[in-house]
Amino acid sequence: MIDYDKIRKIHSDTVRVVTDAGRVPNNSTFIYVSNGLYVKAGTPYHIHYTSDLQEHFMTGAKHSVTSRIIRKIREKTNFQLYTENRGKKYTILEPPKVKYIPNTNDYLEGSFIRFFALKLDSEEPPIEVNEDFESPLYVVHKIKWTISGNKLLVKRTNDRNVERLKLQSPRLKKILANKLEYYIEPTKSDLQETLQKLGLGGVARDKDGNLVKPEAGNAPTNEEQTSSTTSNVYQTQNLPSGFNAGSGPPPGFGTGGSGGGGGAGGY
């Protein structure tokens, strides 16, 4: 039995028709609405879309007096899925935003990598995250951050890396204003302070940490300087007054027999 009343109602509400929409793929995909029997595989059908956002299948590549209403039973079409979920709102869960804090190993290495996430299609400021952060809603930028060493060099290095990071997005310009963030000023040990007071702060060490004796030509130690100065004083005190190193040995100062003869000639 053909449902003529339903067909007329569908036609009166139709806003779009898709002719020759396809063929029934097998014997268990569509049924006739009027009697519930399966539609034979290979049967052509067309589709009516109505003003109440409904989708109606009918037999025949185009509508005719023999067309009958059929219904898909195995799966829902994309149109059915859309209309059933129309108006619903979905919230994509954002991953946790965990900021990384440098540890002891990072300070021994002298630097670590920082990560900043920018939300797509948004003007929200960047957020600092760790390396495990991952989300299709964000794009993540990274920067190498120095935290130990010479203070001036650390600041210059971080400043240079920040400038490079800013080139990737204008929204990154307002971050990392403190170029010495996480930096710790190195402290001197008691041993280092004692060595500096003794003038040995710059003396090299061997692989075992022992001080290495300066090679010839290097500055002498304090003890060597004192010994040399004392020897020079003694030598100066043994010379007669008026001696000038540029005029040669004074009268009466000579070596061997010639020195003695010179002395006798003076009498």
Image (tube, grey):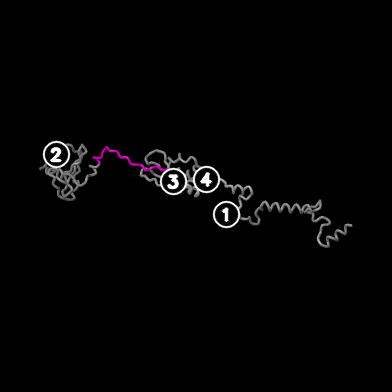
* Distance in Å between CA atoms under marks 2 and 3: 63 Å
Q: Which mark is residue 142?
A: 3
Q: In whole angstroms, how far apart are the C-alphas of marks 1 and 4?
A: 27 Å
Distance from the alpha carbon under mark 3 to that under mark 4: 18 Å
Front residue of this view, candidates 179 and 107: 107
Q: Which mark is residue 154?
A: 4
Residue type, mark 4 in image:
Val
Name the quadrant containing residue 251. Answer: bottom right
Give left or right: position of 221 versus 156. right
Quadrant showing the N terminus: top left
Of labels 2 and 3, earlier in sequence is: 2
| Local secondary structure at mark 2 | helix
**Towards the viewer: 240 or 244:** 240
User: How far is mark 3 from mark 1, CA to CA?
Assistant: 38 Å
View extreme (bottom): residue: 257
Q: Quadrant of the C terminus?
A: bottom right
Magenta span: chief secondary structure: loop
Of residue 59 and residue 151, the one placed in the foreground of this image is 151
The residue beneath circle 2 is 6
Residue at image coords 18%, 48%: 29
**Side of 220 where 75 appears, left or right:** left
| Type of the residue with mark 2 | Lys
Residue segment shown in magenta: 82-100
Residue found farthest to the right? 267
Q: Residue furthest left?
A: 1
Residue 209, numbered circle: 1
Circles 3 and 1 in contact, beta carbons < 8 Å: no
- Label 2 – label 1 distance at C-alpha: 98 Å
